[in-house]
Image: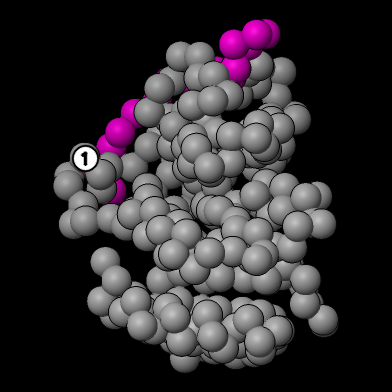
């Protein structure tokens, strides 16, 4: 996994960024450094990294804004680099779809372990026919390989990585109650168990994307004391059928 794996490291502190880049290079990763969000955006014009490490607190565009761009526009896994005094920003980062976080100062070996864990979750082999099949539900369609969600009018509806993972979990188990622990594991991994309210916020965001606010019968229903249920029939169909 490590060979030729490219990391975009975004941090304005050269005293942290440069030795960390050197350490990661020594672990076999290819590292692209950026001291600001603007530099990171420029780097993305010529290369597509496999994962990004993003410092939250940076001058100019902050790390949360950059993280949202990396997730929604680039579909890129992100690990946040946070200071101890930033619990709110850390939670917000996880809620917008960041895959994990490490708190400064951190042990580089722990960071490498988290990078490999996130990459394992994000990696995909050659698609099987079943994986290539699209989901159809209530006029909507989701392409699981391209992460493309289209509404009944055929309009593309952007969704973050976390929203995509949650939607697939619902579509794989229609009309079944999924508890918050399961959904949290799907969206963030067990590392984020202390942020269970992130599940409710992600459900709210996904509901808005699916237009549940204007529905008399919600696609995603709350089950008191249990979790959430996706209340629609779901089909798996091959592209073009």
Q: Colour scheme of this structure image?
A: one colour
Q: Is residue 71 visible?
A: no
Q: Residue furthest top?
A: 224
Query: Residue at 62% of width from left, 71% of height from top?
Result: 54
Count of numbered labels shown in the rendering: 1
Compared to 30, does 175 lie above or below?
Answer: above
Q: Which residue is mark 1?
A: 130
**Is residue 56 positioned above or below 176 on the image?**
below
Quarter holding the N terminus is bottom left
- Residue 162 vs residue 14: left or right? left
Residue 206 occupies which quadrant of the picture?
Answer: top right
Q: Residue 69 versus residue 240: which sits nearer the camera?
A: 69
In front: 34, or 227? 34
- For the C terminus, the image quarter is top left
Label 1, secondary structure: give it.
helix
Residue 220 location, quadrant: top right
Instruction: Tell me if residue 230 is in the magenta stretch.
Output: yes
Magenta highlight on residue 42: no
From the top left corner, tell me how far across and down residue 62 is, in percent. Answer: 77, 72
Q: Is residue 180 above or below residue 91?
A: above
Q: Position of residue 59 (x, y in %)?
A: 82, 81
Say which residue appears at 60% left-offset and 83% top-offset.
17
Q: Which residues are magenta?
A: 223-241
Please provide percent x and percent y for residue 92.
74, 51
> In the picture provided, is 60 more to the left or to the right than 198?
right
In the figure, residue 66 lies in which quadrant?
bottom right
Classify 10 Å Cα crowding around label 1: few (below 14), some (14-19), many (20 and above): few
Can residue 11 be seen in this snapshot?
A: yes
Does 71 appear above or below 175?
below
Residue at x 38% of width, y 28% of height: 172
């Amino acid at each position: 996994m490590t060979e030729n794996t490219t990391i975009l490291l975004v941090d304005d502190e050269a005293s942290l960024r440069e030795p960390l880049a050197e350490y990661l290079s020594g672990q076999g990763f290819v590292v692209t450094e950026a001291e600001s969000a603007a530099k990171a955006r420029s780097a993305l014009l010529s290369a597509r990294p496999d994962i990004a490490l993003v410092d939250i607190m940076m001058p100019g565009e902050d790390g949360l804004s950059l993280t949202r761009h990396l997730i929604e526009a680039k579909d890129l896994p992100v690990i946040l680099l946070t200071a101890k005094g930033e619990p709110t920003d850390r939670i917000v980062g996880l809620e917008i779809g960041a895959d994990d976080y490490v708190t400064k100062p951190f042990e580089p070996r722990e960071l490498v372990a988290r990078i490999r864990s996130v990459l394992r979750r994000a990696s995909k082999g050659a698609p099987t026919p079943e994986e290539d099949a699209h989901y159809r539900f209530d006029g909507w369609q989701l392409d699981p390989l391209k992460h493309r969600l289209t509404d009944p009018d055929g309009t593309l509806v952007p969704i973050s990585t976390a929203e995509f993972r949650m939607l697939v979990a619902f579509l794989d188990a229609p009309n079944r109650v999924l508890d918050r622990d399961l959904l949290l594991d799907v969206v963030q991994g067990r590392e984020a168990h202390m942020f269970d309210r992130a599940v409710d916020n992600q459900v709210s965001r996904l509901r808005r994307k699916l237009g549940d606010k204007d529905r008399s019968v919600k696609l995603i229903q709350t089950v008191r004391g249990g979790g959430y249920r996706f209340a629609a029939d779901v089909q798996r169909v091959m592209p073009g059928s």
